[in-house]
Image: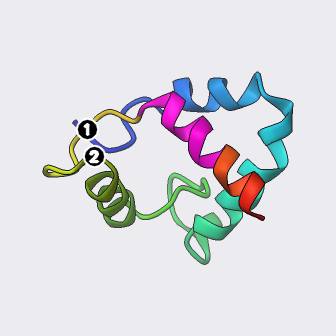
Amino acid sequence: MSPASHPIAAVMSVLVRPRLWWVSVRQLHRLAPRGWWRRAPFLPIPDADYLRFRMITAYGGSGEVRLVPADVVADLTWCREWA
């Protein structure tokens, strides 16, 4: 299973929390590869190797785990409070 196996659930978990909207946009801007608009799928999605690395450091193992929406919310909340 790919590291970003449930991006829709993660997006929905952020959409219902308006206080996280700006921090999620900021984090997406920081993590998006340069020139993302020139390559398919033309979305500011972080590199797959980077996502796998983040999943390994978060959950251990091979990095092939499901993206947990609650963890996305917790991470964005931490980023909001830290900044």
- Quarter holding the C terminus is bottom right
- Horizontal side of residue 18 vs 23, given as left or right: right
Q: What numbered label is drawn on residue 59?
A: 2
Total numbered badges shown on the rendered structure: 2
Q: Position of residue 28 (x, y in %)?
A: 66, 57
- Quarter holding the N terminus is top left
Vertical placement of residue 19 versus 55, above or below: above
**Badge 1 element:** loop
Tell me the magenta residue range: 68-76
Vertical placement of residue 61 versus 34, above or below: above
The quadrant in which residue 30 appears is bottom right
Choose the circle earlier in sequence order: 1 or 2.
2
Give the residue type at disc 2: Tyr
Q: Position of residue 78 (x, y in %)?
A: 65, 51
Give the residue type at disc 1: Val
Vertical placement of residue 7 versus 82, above or below: above
**Badge 2 element:** helix
Q: Nearer the viewer, residue 40 or 25?
A: 25
Q: In the displayed image of the protein, which residue is found farthest to the bottom? A: 34
- Horizontal side of residue 79 vs 21, given as left or right: left
